[in-house]
């Protein structure tokens, strides 16, 4: 039996880790969509209905990657919130597998198990918004794959043409967000730092990285060009620059204030201080001992850690889901340092003391996330056992009080019951889940109120197909804006009120949302 376990250790480890990922994310399947995830799903649904992104619907500053991944999941598993949650669960399983094999390649199976364990728990932390379907939870798969390919090919001294795979995977990350460039930066760093240095080999490899990037970029650009949407795609970069410099929707930290540089550090120090400290110590040791022959590849994970940290910064907002980008290298570096401590302490202390101390440290690290999620899992278990309602599970279990998940579900059901698929609805709110949940179109290309009027006339809201306009009651308590003011979530422009009173009448109020119906001609 012992021999069988040893022979199948790899398979059994992966099986246990896979079950762990599924169990950690199981309650997420029944949870209603958060805001950003629902916006992604709205665009993905329209893509599947034959409307390419950037045409009749535009996501402002986002590139197409996540929307077409969503569309793929909806196509394969069906158009529902649960399908997308299951799709992400499977996506996270594959992401964990890739991290496992990357760690095993770098430093053996112990590192693989520890790193995958840390990643599984930390990426599912409810305070890091691991129970959403944000873009960052999807992009980690191609990011890990691209780093794995880069280090593997570099270690094997593979022919230069094979480095095209690195460029291809790297540009996939770019298509999720234009700032995800760590693969390309790391490829350049490795080539110019490696010894012995060969200008010819370096040039050849980097050229093939560029060829691979073109192979992943040209088909996407060509597709949107054939749809006549290349200019609309290009607007993403214009809006992206504005989003980073002056965010219309959310107040960002002043560019000259240094605090935003520490947001990820503050986040991890707050959400898992044990893994954060281990990763800092591990990163420092890897860089300090970077010339050690056994750490030739592992030191590049420390560099990736720094690059991932930088990728989480540009928006200058404290958004915990950005920190998901840092989790893969953080988990690897923290796990390596824990194993390094084991090698050091086993020479100084009794074996039991070493196992007790480091085992306790590991349990402490994963116990922090377990503690964060405990309330969520407890309410889910009570709901599944029939001891409390689904509403209680969502209201008391989910740690995001700003998400009016149940109220929006009721509102969406009301809209769906009183409209046909041909009717449009407009919601003056930042809670854009309504469009996906109700399965109804917005009359505007852009669904975010704060970007109203950027792609078309704001009066597009009042086209004849718009049957309902929904406005939160708190909006009416805010002072009216002049016609020239930029839209916001909490104030109506004067012109909007005039159009509304002319063509619509208040039908009912639901969950403090005033529902206006078009006056029949």
Image (tube, rainbow, N blue to C red):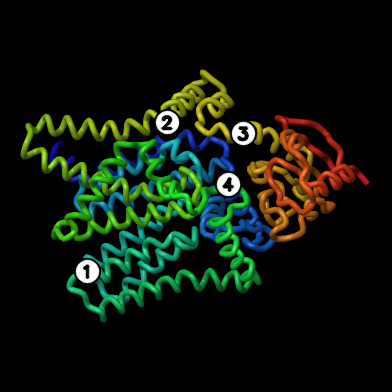
The secondary element bearing badge 4 is classed as: loop
Mark 3 → mark 4, Cα distance in angstroms: 21 Å
Residue nearest the observer in this picture, 49 or 134: 134
State which mark lies toward you, 4 or 2.
Answer: 4
On the question of residue 11 being in view, the answer is: no
The secondary element bearing badge 1 is classed as: loop
Nearer the N terminus, badge 1 or badge 2?
A: 1
Nearer the N terminus, badge 1 or badge 4?
A: 1
Mark 1 → mark 4, Cα distance in angstroms: 43 Å
Is residue 34 rendered to the left or right of residue 488?
left
Look at mark 2 in the image and give the residue it sits on.
Answer: 373
Mark 4 → mark 2, Cα distance in angstroms: 29 Å
Residue nearest the observer in this picture, 232 or 381: 232
Mark 1 → mark 3, Cα distance in angstroms: 52 Å
Q: Is residue 386 above or below residue 53?
A: above
Mark 3 → mark 2, Cα distance in angstroms: 19 Å
The secondary element bearing badge 2 is classed as: helix
Nearer the N terminus, badge 3 or badge 2?
A: 2
User: Crowdedness of circle 3 by 10 Å Cα count: few (<14), some, many (20+)?
Assistant: some
Q: Which mark is residue 194?
A: 1
Nearer the N terminus, badge 3 or badge 4?
A: 4
Residue 191 rendering spot, x and y as whole percentages: 27, 70
Is residue 52 rendered to the left or right of residue 332?
right
Residue drawn at point x = 22 percent, y = 78 percent? 198
Residue 54 rendering spot, x and y as whole percentages: 64, 62
Look at mark 4 in the image and give the residue it sits on.
Answer: 251
Q: Are marks 1 and 2 in contact (CB under 8 Å)?
A: no
Residue drawn at point x = 41 percent, y = 41 percent? 267
Q: Which mark is residue 404?
A: 3
State which mark lies toward you, 1 or 4.
Answer: 4
């Amino acid at each position: 039996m012992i021999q069988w376990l040893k022979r199948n250790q790899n398979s059994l480890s992966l099986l246990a880790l896979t079950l762990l990922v599924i169990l950690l994310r199981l309650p997420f399947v029944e949870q209603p969509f958060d805001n950003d995830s629902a916006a992604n799903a709205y665009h993905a649904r329209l893509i599947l209905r034959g409307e390419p992104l950037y045409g009749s619907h535009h996501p402002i500053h986002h590139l197409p990657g996540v929307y077409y991944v969503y569309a793929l999941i909806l196509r394969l598993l069906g158009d529902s919130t649960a399908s997308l949650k299951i799709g992400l669960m499977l996506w996270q399983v594959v992401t964990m597998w890739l991290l496992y094999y990357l760690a095993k390649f770098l430093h053996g199976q112990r590192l693989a198990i520890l790193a995958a364990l840390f990643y599984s728990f930390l990426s599912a932390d409810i305070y890091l918004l691991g129970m959403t379907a944000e873009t960052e939870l999807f992009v980690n798969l191609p990011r890990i794959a691209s780093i794995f390919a880069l280090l593997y090919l570099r270690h094997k001294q593979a022919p230069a043409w094979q480095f095209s795979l690195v460029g291809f995977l790297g540009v996939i990350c770019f298509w999720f967000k234009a700032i995800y460039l760590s693969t390309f930066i790391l490829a350049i760093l490795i080539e110019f730092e490696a010894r012995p240095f060969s200008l010819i080999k370096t040039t050849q490899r980097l050229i093939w990285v560029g060829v691979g990037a073109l192979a992943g970029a040209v088909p996407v650009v060509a597709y949107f060009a054939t749809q006549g949407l290349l200019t609309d795609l290009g607007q993403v970069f214009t809006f992206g620059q504005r989003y980073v410099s002056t965010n219309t929707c959310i107040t960002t930290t002043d560019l000259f204030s240094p605090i935003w540089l520490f947001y990820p550090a503050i986040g991890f120090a707050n959400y898992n201080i044990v893994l954060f400290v281990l990763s800092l110590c591990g990163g420092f040791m890897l860089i300090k001992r970077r010339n050690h022959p056994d750490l030739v590849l592992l030191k590049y994970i420390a560099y990736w850690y720094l690059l991932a940290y930088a990728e989480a910064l540009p928006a200058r907002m404290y958004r915990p889901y950005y920190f998901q980008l840092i989790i893969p290298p953080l988990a690897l570096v923290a796990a390596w340092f824990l194993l390094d401590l084991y090698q050091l302490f086993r020479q100084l202390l009794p074996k039991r003391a070493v196992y007790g101390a480091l085992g306790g440290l590991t349990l402490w690290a994963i116990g922090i996330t377990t503690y964060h999620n405990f309330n969520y899992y407890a309410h889910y278990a009570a709901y599944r056992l029939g001891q409390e309602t689904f509403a209680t599970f969502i209201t008391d279990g989910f740690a995001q009080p700003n998400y009016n998940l149940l109220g929006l579900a009721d509102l969406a059901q009301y809209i769906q019951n009183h409209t046909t698929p041909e009717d449009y609805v407009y919601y003056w709110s930042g809670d854009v889940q309504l469009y996906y949940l109700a399965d109804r179109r917005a009359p505007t290309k852009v669904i975010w109120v704060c970007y109203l009027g950027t792609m078309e006339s704001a009066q597009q809201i009042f086209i004849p197909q718009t049957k309902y306009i929904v406005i939160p009651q708190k909006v009416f308590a805010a002072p009216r804006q002049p016609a020239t003011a930029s839209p916001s979530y909490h104030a109506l422009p004067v012109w909007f009120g005039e159009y509304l009173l002319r063509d619509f009448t208040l039908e009912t109020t639901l969950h403090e949302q005033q529902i206006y119906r078009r006056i029949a001609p």
